[in-house]
Amino acid sequence: MARPVVGIISNSHLINDQYPAHAGGTMNSCAVAHVSDCLPLIIPADPSLVSVDELLETCDGFLLTGGRPNVHPEEYGEPETPAHGSFDRSRDATTLPLIRACVERGQPFFGVCRGFQEVNVALGGTLYPEIRDLPGRDNHRMPPDGTLEEKFALRHKVAFTDGGPFHKLLGATEVMTNTLHGQGIKVAGPRIVIDGTAPDGTPEAIYVRGAPGFTLSVQWHPEWNAASDPVSRPLFQAFGEAVHAFADAKGRPALKRA
C-alpha cells in the first residue's frame, strides 16, 4: 500500500550563487520518510507554479520547514525594516493561505521554525524581527561557526503547559531543544495557543485552538536526529499518525445519499 504524501515546503535557493532551485533539506525528507512513515514530496513554494487547491488534493499533510528568508512584515501589518532581514514573498503567498485552508479542513501540518512563525502570521499574529535585541531575551540564533552537530546541539530548555498537548505527547513538562532562529512571536494570533516557552519567555511550541486536525508547531528544529532524539521522534511519529488517519479518511468511499 502506498504511503500517504507529506508535502515539504521548499525554499528558494541559488546553486553556485547562480542557478535557481527549489530546495528542501535532506533531514526533513528523512524525518518524514523514516519517522512519520510518509512519502516526502518537495513542494515549490511559488503560487505561479502550484495552487492551494492542488496541494490540498495531492498531499495528505504538510511539513512547514525552516528557512533563512523571513515572513514579510506586510503580512502582519507592519512596515519593512533592515532588521527584518531577507524575504520570500512567493513562499508567503503559498503557505499562508495553505495553512488557513488546512485548519479549516482538518488537514495535518507540522510547523518548524519559519513554519512555526508562518502559522502564527496566517492566524492573525505578529512577529518580532530580532529576538536577541529585546531586553531580557537570549540570542536564539544558530552559532555562526562549528560543525552541524555543534550548530544543532541542545542549547536551552522548553517548558510546556502542564496537561497540554506537548506535555501529553512527550511525557514531560520540560525538555531540551536546539535553537537556530532570529525572529519570534510578538503577538499570538487569536486562535494560537502558546503551549511551550524558553526560559527567557520566547514562545517555542504552539497549536491552533479548536482546529480539527494536527496543528502542532515548534520554534526549534526537530528534524535534526529525528529518528533517535527522544523529543523529535514522538513529534514526527504523532504527525505521521495524523497524516495516515487523514489519508485513510479521505480514501474511504463516500456514503450513498438516500
Image (tube, helix red, strand yellow):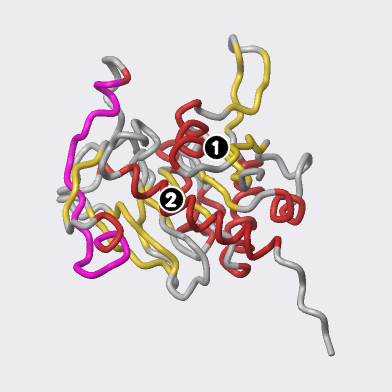
Q: Amino acid at mark 1?
A: Phe
Label 1, label 2: how far apart the Cα atoms are: 16 Å
Q: Residues within 10 Å of mark 1 (few under 14, many from 20)?
A: some
Residue 36 appears at what percent x and percent y?
A: 47, 44
Q: Residue at x 43, y 50 (%)?
A: 116
Q: Amino acid at mark 2?
A: Phe
Residue 209 appears at what percent x and percent y?
A: 43, 72
Say whether disc 1 or disc 2 marks the residue closer to the N-terminus. 1
Residue 250, image quadrant: bottom right
Q: Residue at x 48, y 55 (%)?
A: 241
Magenta-highlighted residues? 149-167
* Of 29 and 144, the residue lying toward us: 29
Is the C terminus in the top left, top right, bottom left or bottom right quadrant? Answer: bottom right
Residue 160 is marked as: none
* Of 245 and 235, the residue lying toward us: 245
The residue positioned farthest toward the front in the image shown: 1
* Tag 2 secondary structure: helix
Residue corresponding to mark 1: 87
Q: Residue at x 19, y 43 (%)?
A: 176
The residue positioned farthest toward the top in the image shown: 16
Closer to the observer: label 1 or label 2?
2
* Tag 1 secondary structure: loop
* Of 222 and 196, the residue lying toward us: 222
Q: Is residue 245 left or right of residue 93?
A: left
Residue corresponding to mark 2: 116
The residue positioned farthest toward the right in the image shown: 258
Q: Residues within 10 Å of mark 2 (few under 14, many from 20)?
A: many
Residue 60 in the magenta stretch? The answer is: no
